[in-house]
Image (cartoon, grey):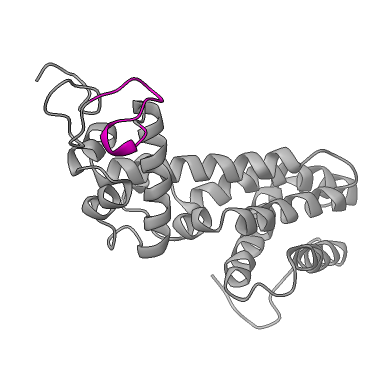
Amino acid sequence: MNGSNPETSPAGSADGHRPAAPGHRARGGRVRMTGKQRREQLLEIGRSVFAERGYDGTSVEEIAERAGVSKPVVYEHFGGKEGLYAVVVDREMQLLLDMVTGALTGGHSRELLEQAAFALMDYIDTSTDGFKILVRDSPVAQSTGSFASLISDIATQVEDILGLEFKARGFDPKLAPMYSQMLVGMVALTGQWWLEVRKPQKSEVAAHLVNLAWHGLEGMERHPKLVGERQG
């Protein structure tokens, strides 16, 4: 092996075509992709197939066939199905985290909760394939994280909001991390349900989520206890 890219090598090209300069047409009128363009194409196709079939139901053969290349091209770019999946998951996790944290532009505490809830609903609406991939168990969770760890990252952002709110209302701010996990988890699970039914519209769902969360916080007891006699 001389380390050459199979998409650009003069001979033995992995996708079975002779190289041409970026933007030039190969025989048959097909536009020749650069390595970067091919990588992006494989990522988009892989994202679609993973969302449709799940990790176990997806094969390198199908991804290569949809891309119009041979299997070695996929292996050259990602090392195999697991590597491709890891990049897809990492991208989706970063997109969702960016959308939620970017939405927290300030204002009243309730408005911040609205911004976070709507951002998550907006992600589900505009990146449905990505959300489907994230909510499935990842076979490479240790290297890419998981939906649970992503929700935890988002909850950390909400934690700061709740900490200030708790302190202002006389509650123990040390409890803010636990409550932020509860709130974000509620939004995430509602989002999974909404993904299937798509009713009502996302802004209305976000409004109801915040309604429950905000008024639940308003009526919260400082030292809650279970009504029944339960220990442990």
Q: Position of residue 120 (x, y in %)?
A: 66, 54
Residue at horizontal 27 percent and vertical 61 percent from the top: 56
Residue at horizontal 87 percent and vertical 63 percent from the top: 218
Q: Quadrant of residue 99?
A: top right
Q: How many marks?
A: 0
134 sits left or right of 26 in the view = right
Question: Which secondary structure dominates the residues rendered in magenta?
Answer: loop
**Which residue is nearer to you in this view: 187 or 196?**
196
Q: Is residue 151 visible?
A: yes
Residue at the bottom extreme? 228
157 sits left or right of 139 in the view = right
Residue at horizontal 76 percent and vertical 66 percent from the top: 209
**Which residue is nearer to you in this view: 114 or 65?**
65
Q: Is residue 29 magenta?
A: yes
Residue at the top extreme? 2
115 sits left or right of 229 in the view = right
**Which residue is nearer to you in this view: 220 or 193?**
193
Span colored in magenta:
19-31
Residue at the left extreme? 1
Q: Position of residue 91 (x, y in %)?
A: 48, 40
